[in-house]
Image (spheres, rainbow, N blue to C red):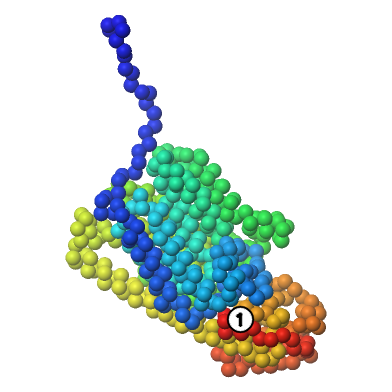
C-alpha cells in the first residue's frame, strides 16, 4: 500500500432501524376518511339515540359525583372516576341528560377518529375506515357512545396504545409513539384500571420476548402509564378502603367473586340488547343477534392471513392477542355479562377483520364484483340486526326516562323535595331525577343504617321505595304510604314517606 494514501474503513456493523414500509399513495391522506368515520359515528348517535333518552343507573352514579344540584351517590369499590372527569364540565353547568348526551356523542366521534389516526402509519386508510365503520355500527358502540360510561373510552385507549406500541417497535425514531404509548395506557387506566392491567400484559411480554421488538424501556413506559392513570384509584383505595388490596378484594366481592366462571354463553345471550345480564339465566330468544359473534373468530383469522400476505403480520397478530387478553376476565372470571365489557376487544378486532374483508373483496387491489356484492349483502343484513337491537334498547331507555321523571314528580307532590333522601328499590337512579340523595342500608351500596335514616327523617324528607309485592320494611314502620300510580314501570310502587314537615320547592325533574 503506498505511503500517504488515506485508507477508508467501513463503519462497524450495528443494528439497523428501518422505518415501516411507506404508505401507498392512495392511502397517504387518511385525514378526510378517518374524520368522516368519526363524524358519521357522532351523527348516528345524535339522530338515533340522543333525543329523549335518559340516564341509566350507572350513569346516575357517575354523573351525580359532579352534577350541579344533585347529591353524590355512593361510589363503590370497582368504579373509577375517569368518566366523571370527562363529563365534569358539562355536568357542572346543567343536569340535563340531553346536553350530556350531545357532548358525549361529539366527543366519542372525535375519540374514534383519534384512535384510528394512531394506526395511519401501520395500515392502509381503506382498512382503517372500514374497521372504524364496523366498530361504530355495532349497537353496543352506538348505544354507549353518548352514555356516561367508561367502557367505550377504555376501548379507544386500548386501540391507541396497541398502535403506539407497534409504531414504537417498528420505528425507534418515532418519538410521538413513545409519548403516546403511556398516555393511551393512562387513559385506559383512568377509565377502567383492571382493563388497563390486562391491556399491558401482551405488549410487555412482546417487548421482552420478541427478539426484533426487544425494548425493556417500553415495559417501563407501559408500567408508567398504568400507574399514572390508576393513581387516583390507588390513592382513594388507601383513603377509603384501607389499602389497594382491600379495595381489590371489596371490588371482587361486589362483582360476585373473581375466579373461574365460564361467562361466554352469558355474553352471547346479552347480545340481544341486555345491558346487564345478572344473573344470566334467561332464555336465548334471539339467536340471530349473535351470528356476527360466532363469525368473529373466523373473520379475525382471515384478517391475520391477509396481514401475513401483505408482509405486516404484526398489524393483525398484536391487536388480536391484546383483544383476547382484555376479554379474558369478562369471558372466564366473572359470573355475569354486560356487552359493553367487551368493547375494547371489539375495537381491536375490527382492524384485522376489516383487513380480511378487503382481502376478500379486492385480493389484487381491484374489487371483484361478485365477492363485493356478497360481502355488501352480508354487511347489510348485519347492520339491520344491529339497528333492530339498538332501536329496541333506545325505546326502552326513553320509556325509562318518562317513568323516572313521572315518579320524581309524584314524589315532589308528596312533599319529598330537595333536600331529601331516598332508599330502597331504584332509589339510586330515581334520586338523581328527583334531586335527592340516595342511601342504602344493605347490598353493595350500603352506606348508612336504618337508625341513621330515621334520624335524618327528623329534619328532612326521607322516602323508602318498595316494589308492588313487597312488604313495608321495618324502617318505614309508622310512616305514611303513598302509591306511585300511573308511572309505567313504577306502577304499584309505594313510597313510605317520613312524617317530617314538607320543605323546599320542586326543582323540576323534567330537566333531567
Q: Report the side of 390 relative to 88 (left or right).
A: left
Question: Can residue 319 be spotted in the picture?
Answer: yes
Where is residue 54? Give x, y as percent. Answer: 53, 79
Quickly name the residue at label 1: 433
Q: Secondary structure at mark 1?
A: helix
Q: Report the side of 139 relative to 458 (left or right).
A: left
Where is residue 470? Give x, y as percent. Answer: 67, 88
Relative height, residue 388 to residue 256 (above, below): below
Relative height, residue 415 to residue 99 (above, below): below
Q: Residue at x 58, y 63 (%)?
A: 85
Where is residue 340? Give x, y as percent. Answer: 49, 68
Where is residue 107? Give x, y as percent. Answer: 47, 65
Q: Residue at x 46, y 60 (%)?
A: 156
Q: Residue at x 59, y 50 (%)?
A: 227
Quadrant showing the C terminus: bottom right
Q: Alpha-carbon neighbours of circle 1 within 10 Å: few (<14), some, or many (≥20)?
A: many
Q: Report the side of 30 relative to 476 (left or right).
A: left
Quadrant showing the N terminus: top left
Question: Toward the viewer: 507 or 53?
Answer: 507
Q: In which image quadrant can residue 82 be found?
A: bottom right
Question: Toward the viewer: 293 or 493?
Answer: 493
Q: Report the side of 389 relative to 366 (left or right).
A: right
Q: In which image quadrant can residue 29 be found?
A: bottom left
Q: Residue at x 78, y 87 (%)?
A: 500
Question: Can residue 61 be spotted in the picture?
Answer: no
Q: Residue lying at the far front in this picture: please name it.
A: 93
Amino acid at each position: 500500500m503506498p505511503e500517504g494514501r488515506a485508507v477508508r474503513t467501513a463503519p462497524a456493523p450495528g443494528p439497523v432501524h428501518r422505518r415501516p414500509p411507506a404508505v401507498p399513495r392512495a392511502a397517504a391522506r387518511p385525514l378526510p376518511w378517518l374524520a368522516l368515520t368519526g363524524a358519521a359515528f357522532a351523527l348516528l348517535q345524535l339522530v338515533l339515540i340522543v333525543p329523549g333518552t335518559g340516564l341509566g343507573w350507572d350513569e346516575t352514579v357517575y354523573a351525580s359525583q359532579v352534577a350541579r344540584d344533585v347529591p353524590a351517590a355512593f361510589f363503590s369499590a370497582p368504579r373509577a372516576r375517569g368518566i366523571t372527569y370527562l363529563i365534569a364540565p358539562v355536568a357542572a353547568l346543567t343536569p340535563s341528560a340531553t346536553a350530556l348526551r350531545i357532548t358525549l356523542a361529539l366527543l366519542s366521534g372525535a375519540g374514534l377518529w383519534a384512535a384510528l389516526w394512531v394506526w395511519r402509519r401501520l395500515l392502509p386508510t381503506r382498512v382503517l375506515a372500514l374497521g372504524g365503520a364496523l366498530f361504530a355500527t355495532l349497537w353496543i358502540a352506538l348505544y354507549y357512545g353518548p352514555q356516561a360510561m367508561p367502557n367505550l373510552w377504555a376501548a379507544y385507549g386500548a386501540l391507541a396504545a396497541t398502535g403506539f406500541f407497534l409504531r414504537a417497535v417498528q420505528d425507534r425514531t418515532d418519538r410521538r409513539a413513545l409519548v403516546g404509548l403511556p398516555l393511551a395506557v393512562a387513559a385506559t387506566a383512568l377509565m377502567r384500571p383492571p382493563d388497563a392491567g390486562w391491556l399491558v400484559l401482551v405488549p410487555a411480554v412482546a417487548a421482552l420476548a420478541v427478539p426484533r421488538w426487544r425494548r425493556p424501556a417500553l415495559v417501563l413506559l407501559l408500567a408508567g402509564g398504568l400507574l399514572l392513570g390508576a393513581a387516583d384509584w390507588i390513592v382513594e383505595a388507601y383513603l377509603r378502603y384501607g389499602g389497594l388490596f382491600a379495595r381489590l378484594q371489596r371490588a371482587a366481592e361486589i362483582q360476585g367473586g373473581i375466579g373461574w366462571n365460564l361467562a361466554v354463553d352469558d355474553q352471547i345471550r346479552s347480545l340481544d340488547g341486555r345491558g346487564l345480564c345478572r344473573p344470566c339465566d334467561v332464555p336465548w330468544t334471539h339467536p340471530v343477534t349473535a351470528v356476527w359473534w360466532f363469525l368473529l373468530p373466523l373473520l379475525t383469522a382471515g384478517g391475520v392471513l391477509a396481514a401475513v400476505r401483505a408482509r405486516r403480520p404484526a398489524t393483525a397478530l398484536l391487536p388480536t392477542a391484546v383483544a383476547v387478553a382484555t376479554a379474558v376476565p369478562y369471558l372466564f372470571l366473572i359470573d355475569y355479562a354486560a356487552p359493553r365489557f367487551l368493547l375494547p376487544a371489539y375495537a381491536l378486532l375490527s382492524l384485522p377483520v376489516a383487513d380480511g374483508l378487503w382481502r376478500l373483496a379486492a385480493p389484487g387491489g381491484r374489487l371483484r364484483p361478485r365477492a363485493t356484492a356478497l360481502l355488501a349483502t352480508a354487511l347489510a343484513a348485519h347492520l339491520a340486526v344491529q339497528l333492530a337491537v339498538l332501536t329496541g334498547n333506545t325505546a326502552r331507555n326513553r320509556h325509562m326516562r318518562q317513568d323516572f321523571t313521572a315518579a320524581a314528580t309524584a314524589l315532589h307532590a308528596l312533599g319529598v323535595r330537595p333536600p331529601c333522601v331516598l332508599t330502597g328499590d331504584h332509589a339510586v337512579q330515581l334520586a338523581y331525577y328527583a334531586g335527592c340523595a340516595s342511601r342504602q342500608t344493605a347490598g353493595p351500596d350500603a352506606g348508612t343504617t336504618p337508625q341513621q335514616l330515621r334520624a335524618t327523617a327528623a329534619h328532612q324528607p326521607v322516602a323508602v321505595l318498595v316494589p308492588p309485592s313487597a312488604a313495608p320494611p321495618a324502617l318505614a314502620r309508622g310512616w305514611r304510604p303513598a302509591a306511585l300510580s300511573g308511572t309505567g314501570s313504577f306502577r304499584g310502587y309505594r313510597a313510605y314517606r317520613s312524617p317530617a314537615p314538607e320543605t323546599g320547592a320542586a326543582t323540576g325533574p323534567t330537566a333531567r
